[in-house]
Amino acid sequence: MDRRHFIAGTAATGAALTPSLTTSLTSGTALAQDAYPSRAVTMINPFPPGGAADVVGRPLAAVLEPILKQPVVIDTKAGAAGAVGAQVAASAKPDGYTLLLHIVSLSGFAEVDRVYGRPVKFTNDDFIPIARLIADPMVLLVNDQVPYKTLKELVDAAKAKPDSLLFSSSGLHGALHLPTALFLKAADIKMKHLPTNGGGPALTALIGNNAQVLASSFAAANAQIKAGKARALASFGAKRDPQHPNVPTMKELGYDIEFYLWVGLFAPKGTPDAIVTKLRGEVKKAVVTEKFESAIKNLGQDVAYLDAPDFKKFWDADATRVVDAVRTIGKI
């Protein structure tokens, strides 16, 4: 049959597909979905290189590649404390080829927009949680140039001289600012804020005594704690950190606060269920590999994997804490 006869034939019968042809097309669609992924998968890192999402995402990408049998690329889209990359992911085609690596601060962007009276660019509902990868409890630190050995001593000093102490953070309404705000509210104390452009600079400010207080992840501060340059006063975890068993939790000390620097993997809203299920299964295989677990251990952390249903429950509860912190900080 030549091309003209084929076109004429399909035109004549296009309005009345036979059951067998309909079945064939449906099967073809199913096969196309089953073939996912058929090209490179991109994970957006919304922070500068070296941040939590980046250092967790890169070993994940490395172990996922042979499992998915396709390249897995980390694409850095930094800006606005992680909001730029999140918006790129929220607007991406929901086909499983653009995913998002993000941290605890993802839950606060919509509330920050509301606080400032801006249009909300995206909400948590614009993302489908795939898996939580790590959940490092935050720790409240002071440097070695101040005398405080306990949280009570710090609180007493702050109450005696409000705004005399400075705390550093990774930026306004960022992952290090939020738990500090919750602590200041719970302790009913005031400190001045020194925002920086990342967790590294915030820790540098603490060690250099440009700030005296910092809420950090244990992993980021481990080296300085061991060197005696930073003193851990209290953990924001539900229980004491195994690597720092002498550091009490906020709850032990009478403050009902819990906060983690977690990293999760997300897909844009509308991603087909079959692709989400495929990703969940493949990520579950990846996180139990020796290669991934070793990479996370080298960061001074443990894998804290949660599959989508449990991650969603955790995220919902965690988002309540984040929104509370954003409202506590308010408009600056």
Image (cartoon, grey):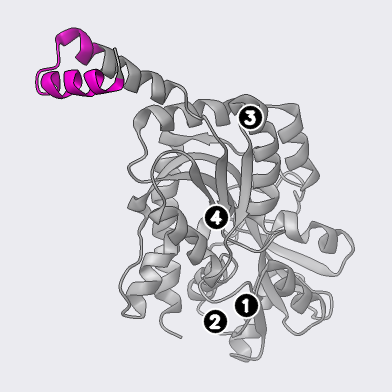
Where residue 175 sits in the image (x, y, percent)? 56, 64
> How many callouts does the rendering have?
4
Residue 251: x %, y % from top left: 55, 57
In contact (CB < 8 Å): disc 2 and disc 1: yes
Query: Could you tell me which secondary element the residue under label 4 belongs to?
Result: strand
Helix, strand or loop at disc 3?
helix
Label 1 is placed on what type of residue?
Val
Please name the residue shown 40% across and 72% down the image: 112
Label 3 environment density (alpha carbons within 10 Å; few <14, some 14–19, many ≥20): many
Q: Quadrant of residue 59?
A: top right
Return the residue at label 2. Answer: 189
Sooner in the amino-acid sequence: mark 4 or mark 2:
4
Residue 170, labelled with which disc? none
| Residue that carries the numbered disc 1 in the rendered image | 155
* Cα separation between marks 1 and 4: 28 Å
- Of badges 4 and 2, the one in the foreground is 4
| Residue behind mark 4 | 103
Distance between mark 3 and mark 1 Cα atoms: 43 Å
Question: Label 1 crowding class (10 Å Cα cut-off): few <14, some 14-19, many 20+?
Answer: some
Q: Which residue is mark 3?
A: 286
Give the mark nearest the N terminus, 3 or 4: 4
Q: Residue at x 78, y 35 (%)?
A: 294
Q: Which structural element holds mark 1?
A: helix
Main SS of residues in magenta = helix
| Residue under the point 41% across and 42% down | 312
Please say whether residue 5 is one of the residues in the magenta stretch: yes
Mark pair 2, 1: CA separation = 7 Å
